[in-house]
Amino acid sequence: MSIPNRLGAPEPTWTHDVDVIVLGSGAAGLSAALAARPVRDVLVVTKDVLSAGSTAWAQGGLAGVLGPTDSLQHHVADTLAAGAGLCDEGVVRRLVEEAPRAIRYLMRLGAAFDPDADGRGVALTREGGHSHNRIVHSGGDQSGREVQRTLDQSAIAAGVEVMEWSFALDLLVGQNANGQRQTAGVRIAVTDAAGHVFSVGDVTARAVVLATGGYGQIFASTSNPPAVTGDGLAMALRAGLAVTDAEFVQFHPTVMWRGPDARGQQALVSEAVRGEGAILFDAAGRRVMEGVHPQEDLAPRDVVAAAISARMAEAPAGVDDHVYLDATHLGERFYERFPSITAACRDAGIDPACERIPVAPAAHYACGGISADLDGRTAMTGLFAVGEVSATGVHGANRLASNSLTESVVAGTNLGRDLEWELPERVDPGEAPDGTEALLEPERRRDVRSAMSHNVGVLRHAGSLTAAVEQLHAVAGKATVGVTPSRDAWEATNVLTVAAAVAAAAKTRTESRGCHRRTDYGESRDIWLTHLGVALQDGEIAVTGVPPGA
Ligand code: SIN
């Protein structure tokens, strides 16, 4: 395999200097930008428009202990249980303690969360794996949109500079006074809305914040919008950083099924629908979750996604690619409580008040990422990571529903405040690293997605994972220097890079844990109570941290 270690692009023709550059414009990046802005020059760079990432699509909301019968200990316990042994308890505790403050902070910025019945507090709902109602939401199922709107307006009002339609290609890395590699800035391509290059330049900065989100688009079917192509992770891999826990891809159990040929972003049917009492049935009319887990339809989502996949494999009534979610007990109340899902159902010709909704699992969230603490610090000075691109220890092997927006606001704000106080010393960008600048033709992205969806889905085994690694190897062999640089080609190359990392990690972990489910190793194994790292070395994926005897 030869995965490019630099993205091919025209030579840079301009430079710009700021204190802090933030890559990505979802909840994590904008929280960091907003908190750092009062005393820093902050530039937010996004390859699309500000709201193109996953945040605006989040339906559920933000988890935080706000109800009188709930407790921090319950939220910690639920998060650890979902994370299946791989959470960092200290980090989880810190997140849970800071969560209510982060939610109140958003409200002070102007976020309108749905009120409770007497109108004095906020309404709290429940999702899979939560023992108590603790999720604040907005516009019924439009929580992410409200968080994005609030942070967009706040960041712009605070004077954060924004570059839209600007693709972050590669990190600029220099050397600090201690002889260590340190991030010095980012090479950026300015494009038109179709992704054609206008110009390339170098932005130097004392702090580079990766807030580029996840990588659902490495799969054929995902709840993530088209922009979610793992760009930050691929960039970090090319800069020599390792990705932790890449095998833990969370599949959302209930994404609307629109037929066997549906590809790309599919409409999410929030877990909050099951939180309001909806039940999963197979095509033969049998319940899916009865007897599978004590929390039945509100079990953690790895359990529900695996149960649905196992049931589909039995092809009840001849149907092997979807099951049904029955929310008809809500009647017309469904329309008001879940307006976006209602619109998606109507688009598919379904009335959720009186019909079951066809659903299937689809790629939803990356539990792993660049190792960072809850203040965004990574192993490389000058480089920070917040939100879905990071692995802080909060999610472990499976993220608890609605902990992600909360984590994004907490970690982003913590980081921004730290950067407001203190920045790393400036370093000069070194020479561009040697290496291949090849790119993948945009059409090859289809091959990557197909390899991943067929072989690295909810249920995996040695044969499927070996096939994925081999197919991705063949795709990597097609990367060439002759491809015209464009957003599509950079995304395709990043998609390949991240997919190769995920497939290699999934093949190596010979157990089932959290959202990594192997049919050939159906149980968790104690020797695997550890984290794998995946790095890019000379165009090959290398896996580290394999325990002896595994
Ligand atoms: C959902 O609403 O089901 C998704 C929420 C989440 O992913 O945290």
Image (cartoon, rainbow, N blue to C red):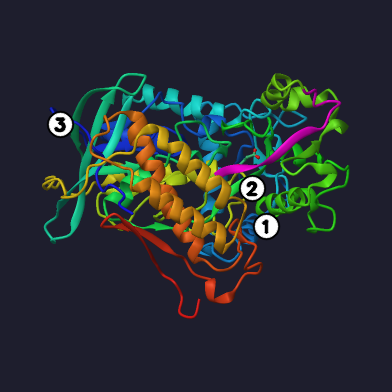
363 in the magenta segment: yes
Q: Which residue is identified by label 1?
A: 74
- What residue sits 43% from the left and 46% below the top? 389
Determine the CA span between mark 2 and mark 3.
49 Å
Instruction: Give whichever of 324, 112 is nearer the camera.
Output: 324
Binning the other alpha carbons within 10 Å of mark 2 as few (below 14), some (14 to 19) or many (20 upward) gives many
Q: Amino acid under label 2?
A: Val
Residue 298 image position (x, y, % from top left): 75, 49
Q: Quadrant of ligand 1?
A: top right
Instruction: Give whichever of 265, 207 is nearer the camera.
Output: 265
- Tell me, yes or no, if residue 484 can be seen here: yes
**Residues under numbered marks 3 and 1 in contact, where contact means CB atoms less than 8 Å apart:** no
Q: Secondary structure at mark 1?
A: helix
Q: Amino acid under label 1?
A: His
Residue 546 image position (x, y, % from top left): 44, 71
Determine the CA span between mark 3 and mark 1.
52 Å
Q: Secondary structure at mark 3?
A: loop
Q: Amino acid under label 3?
A: Pro
Q: Which residue is identified by label 2?
A: 65
Locate residue 496: give its quadrant: top left
- Tell me, yes or no, if residue 160 can be seen here: no
The disc label shown at residue 12, or none: 3
Task: Give the total of numbered labels.
Answer: 3
